Image (cartoon, grey):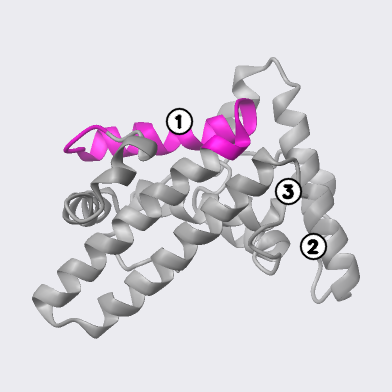
Amino acid sequence: MSPHGSSAPRFRRPAPLYASVAEAIPGEPDPAASSDLAHDSARALLDGVFHSSDAEVVERVVALAAEDGLTDLAALWSGAPATSLPGALWRLYVLHTWSQTSGDDMVRRYRAGSRTVPGLRYLSGFAEPPDVDQVHRSMDEILRGAFTGDLGLALRRAGAVAMIVAHGTAHLADEDADDDRTLQAERLLSTGEDLTAAGRHAEAGQLD
């Protein structure tokens, strides 16, 4: 899903939040067991952070996908349905990781898209026009909010960001006649729609 961006800065990978979860990802697990593990680990992560009063735990969750941590999350969650908790968290982490490693690219696409779909700007919560630091802060805030605040709202905000960036990517693709960007726009739009749908499920108490 992630578009190509500028070279990524190096992050220090955080210590695993749940060692028992990390140890339970050997080679090719049974599909049913994989589904159970995806849902159980996502719920354990969400509940563990929500009920924690330790600010360091929250920051470790925000940094969970730094470096090859995203690979670990992919093994757990990438195959889950979009409107399930692990599927929604996977899409949220992928979008957040891209924003952190390719902030300049995301800003350019966001600015191009915000002219096309101005109604989504208010839900995204981004400053207008955003700079890279503001994008990093806002995406951190969205990710924190998913674990410590209103999960449904956080997912819908992330969905709005993805859809704005998708429209911006499509606009830039038209300018450059770039087929690769057109495919990226389609994937981003799909991600935005998935996150928005997951947010609605969360608000209805149906995201599991």
**83 relative to 107, above or below:** below
Q: Farthest top residue?
A: 53
Predominant SS along the magenta part: helix
Is 141 contained in the magenta span? yes
Q: Decide which of 10, 110 is in the foreground and name it.
A: 110
Point out residue 154 in the picture as x, y percentages from the top left corner.
53, 37
- Measuring 67% from the left and 58% from the top, which residue is drawn there? 83
Q: Nearer the viewer, residue 36 or 159?
A: 159
Drawn side of residue 101 relative to residue 70, left or right: left
| Foreground disc of the pair 2, 1 | 1
Secondary element under disc 3, as helix, strand or loop, is: loop
Front-most of residues 181 and 195: 195
Element assignment for label 1: helix
Instruction: State if disc 3 and disc 1 touch (CB < 8 Å).
Output: no
Quadrant into which the N terminus falls: bottom left
Amino acid carrying label 2: it is Ile
State the extent of the magenta-drawn residues as a range: 127-153
What type is the residue that disc 3 sits on? Leu
Q: CA distance from mark 1 to mark 3?
A: 21 Å
Q: Secondary structure at mark 2?
A: loop
The spot of residue 128 in percent (x, y) is 19, 35
Question: Residue 207, labelled with which disc?
Answer: 3
The tally of labels here is: 3
Q: Position of residue 142 (x, y in %)?
A: 48, 35
The residue labelled by disc 2 is: 25
Q: Which mark is residue 141?
A: 1
- Answer yes or no: is residue 8 visible: no
Q: Nearer the viewer, residue 23 or 204?
A: 204
